[in-house]
Amino acid sequence: MLASCVAGFAQEAVKLKFATLSPSEGPLNARALHPWAERVNAAGKGIVELDVRDGYAIANYDNVYTRVLDDVVQIAFTVTGAISASSFGPTSSPCRSCSTAPTRRRSRSGGFIKPAD
């Protein structure tokens, strides 16, 4: 009786679209992104499932950030330097002040070193 009640509450795995922005047979996908997605799918079986989308059909370097924000894809791999400023508009870039932001470095003891003013 209890098993049938618990089974009634079972839900499908959450499916997340993962845009790689790389060719399906490219070295980045073959060596890193596809194996990572396979490990996530194996570890999250019944809970989460990554739907890998290769290439530029669903996102590209100019729109990948907004595709994630707009929930077209839920996960994407890119490098921040490749994200186009046109993706954000003139004032909405999350990195517009990154070059002037203070950095934090770790000391040898593991604590943070306060940046010089």
Image: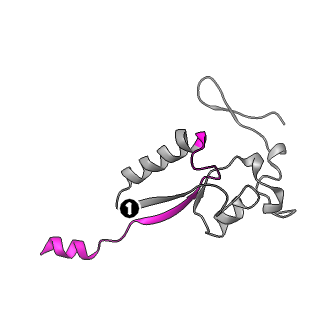
Q: Secondary structure at mark 1?
A: loop
Residue 105 located left or right of residue 52: right
Asked if residue 17 lies in the magenta stretch, the reply is yes
Q: Residue at x 44, y 49 (%)?
A: 38
The image shows residue 67 at horizontal and vertical percentages of: 67, 65
Image vertical order of residue 100 relative to residue 96, above or below: above
Q: Residue furthest top?
A: 108
Vertical placement of 110 versus 97: above or below?
A: above
Total number of numbered discs in the rendering: 1
Bounds of the magenta segment: 1-28
Q: Which residue is mark 1?
A: 47
Question: Picture coordinates of residue 4 (x, y %)?
Answer: 17, 75
Quadrant that contains the C terminus: top right
Q: Position of residue 10 (x, y in %)?
A: 30, 71
Residue pictured at 29% horizontal, 74% vertical: 9
Residue 62 x/y as whole percent: 77, 58
Most distant residue in the left direction: 1
- Above or below — where is 99 with respect to 67? above
Q: Which quadrant of the structure image shows residue 7?
A: bottom left
Magenta highlight on residue 11: yes
Q: Residue furthest front?
A: 25
Q: Is residue 80 left or right of residue 29?
A: right
In the image, is 76 to the left or to the right of 9?
right
Residue at 73% across, 48% down? 80
The colour style of the image is: one colour
Q: Amino acid at mark 1?
A: Ile
Question: 10 Å neighbourhood of mark 1: few (<14), some, or many (≥20)?
Answer: few
Q: Nearer the viewer, residue 64 or 57?
A: 57
Look at the picture and state if 27 lies above or below 66.
above
Q: Depth check: 64 or 106 in front?
A: 64
Residue drawn at the location 12% of the way across and 75% of the way down: 1
